[in-house]
């Protein structure tokens, strides 16, 4: 029996706004083991691939500790174009400092976009990388910001090319596809969910969305015919309209990455202590790079403008490389998968698993498959492991009490507020039962 046939539950976690080199690039450095199987940071002082030039000065990646940044980093479509610094049709990846300065930030000796973290800062990602599998060629689907890339992950196409305050037009939503194919699915959320931005409120309020606080008890009590075959787990988004009980743990700058590492540990611990871990696959990725440097050029994957799109210029490449980790008994410890993947690789995986054909999701996904984007099933090993490495221990931060969002300063904050208001207007009683924090929103 193939490994994919033996997997009963696929768990997907999509974090926010970090690049591969920023989070996992250290794996290739000699002081951290110098893994040659991972395309990370090497020869930083001499290799031209790691040079960013601005105002006749060369800047290179540098080690940074975890902590709150002074501000978010630029990562909209135009800013990413600056970061890629195309030479003809080739991204040189040399414009990250320029994009940062052009966003009205003064230049400093160590520009934040070039900072990389070490294993102490990303203790759980380090654990997963050393005990399970790294994908070092997983790219954000599009060279732009959050909404288009999350829409790609959940539909296979993008009718928007930026993040704005609106309900997102879409087609082929993953919840619809799974339901049509008789797949049991469930979503867990720390706070307010991203999914109301699709406007399909009956999915949100129909009983398949659970608080993260229910994850452990659900795993322990679900009957075999109730266990979800696909699970989405959402962090507490820093841009959420209201925080209640959870601190932001989505990794979105300027917030630190530490809370997100604790969040990942909680998920892994809940899954791995269950007898069902033997049939589980955990996939952890980031939606896009968030303005942080990466030295690997995006792939030349073209995406035409879909019908009904709110933009006119087609995309010519994927986005920047993002951290991607797979934990399962069906991956070998301390290994790296080098094949080309992006968020639509998840949809190929679902199609392969639940429809018997990785081309069964949509024409949009197949268009990327035909340009070299593979399925996540490619990472699986034929033989299952029997060891279950215990998660590392580390102090957990104190949960944050109710906090109204600070004055809205970005479009994602405005979008999530709009989605919350529309969800309340759709069915206030069910919405507050599902997301109690929404009671504090102004209608």
Image (cartoon, rainbow, N blue to C red):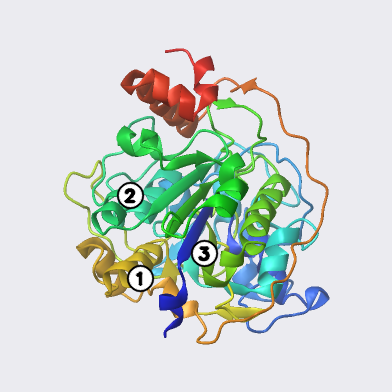
Residue assigned mark 3:
321
Element at label 3 = loop
Spatial CA span between label 3 and label 1: 25 Å
Which quadrant: the N terminus?
A: bottom left
Q: Position of residue 108 (x, y in %)?
A: 73, 46
Q: Residue at the spot x=47%, y=22% of the render?
A: 432
Up/down of 421 relative to 309, above or below: above
Residue 395 appearing in the image: yes
Crowding at mark 1 (Cα within 10 Å: few <14, some 14-19, many 20+): some
Q: Position of residue 38 (x, y in %)?
A: 63, 78
Q: Position of residue 285 (x, y in %)?
A: 53, 59
Q: Earlier in the sequence, mark 2 or mark 1?
A: 2
Label drawn at residue 175: 2
Does 397 sit left or right of 433 as displayed? right
Q: Position of residue 80 (x, y in %)?
A: 47, 52
Element at label 2 = helix
Residue assigned mark 1:
353
Residue 235 appearing in the image: no
Spatial CA span between label 2 and label 3: 26 Å
């Amino acid at each position: 029996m193939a490994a994919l046939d033996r997997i009963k539950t696929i768990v997907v976690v999509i974090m926010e706004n970090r690049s591969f080199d920023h989070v996992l690039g250290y794996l290739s450095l000699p002081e951290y083991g110098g893994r040659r199987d991972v395309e990370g940071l090497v020869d930083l002082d001499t290799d031209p691939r790691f040079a960013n030039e601005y105002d006749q000065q060369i800047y290179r990646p540098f080690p940074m500790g975890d902590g709150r940044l002074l501000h978010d980093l630029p990562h909209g479509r135009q800013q990413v174009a600056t970061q890629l610094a195309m030479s003809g049709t080739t991204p040189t990846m040399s414009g990250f400092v320029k994009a940062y300065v052009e966003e009205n930030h003064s230049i400093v000796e160590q520009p934040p976009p070039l900072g990389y973290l070490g294993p102490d800062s990303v203790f759980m990602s380090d654990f997963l990388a050393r005990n399970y599998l790294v994908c070092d060629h997983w790219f954000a689907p599009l060279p732009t910001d959050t909404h288009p890339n999350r829409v790609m992950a959940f539909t296979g196409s993008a009718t928007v090319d930026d993040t704005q305050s609106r309900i997102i037009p879409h087609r082929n939503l993953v919840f619809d596809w799974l339901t049509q194919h008789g797949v049991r699915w469930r979503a867990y959320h720390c706070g307010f969910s991203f999914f109301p931005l699709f406007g399909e409120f009956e999915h949100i309020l129909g009983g398949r969305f659970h608080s993260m606080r229910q994850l452990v008890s659900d795993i322990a009590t679900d009957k075999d015919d109730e266990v979800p075959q696909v699970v989405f787990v959402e962090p507490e988004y820093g841009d959420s309209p209201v925080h209640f009980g959870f601190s932001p743990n989505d990794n979105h700058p300027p917030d630190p990455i530490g809370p997100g590492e604790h969040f990942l540990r909680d998920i892994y611990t809940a899954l791995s202590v269950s007898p069902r871990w033997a049939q589980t696959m955990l996939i952890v990725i980031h939606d896009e790079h968030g303005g942080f440097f990466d030295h690997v050029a995006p792939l030349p994957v073209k995406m035409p403008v879909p019908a009904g799109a709110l933009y006119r210029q087609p995309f010519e490449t994927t986005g920047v490389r993002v951290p991607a980790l797979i934990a399962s008994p069906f991956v070998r410890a301390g290994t790296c998968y080098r094949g080309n993947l992006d968020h639509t690789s998840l949809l190929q995986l679902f199609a392969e698993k639940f429809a018997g054909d990785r081309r069964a999701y949509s024409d949009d996904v197949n268009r990327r498959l035909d340009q070299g984007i593979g399925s996540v099933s490619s990472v699986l090993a034929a033989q299952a492991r029997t060891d279950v490495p215990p998660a590392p221990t580390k102090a957990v931060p104190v949960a944050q009490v109710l906090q109204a969002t600070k004055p809205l300063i970005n479009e994602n904050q405005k979008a999530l507020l709009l989605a919350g208001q529309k969800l309340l207007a759709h069915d206030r009683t069910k919405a507050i039962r599902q997301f109690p924090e929404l009671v504090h929103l102004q209608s």
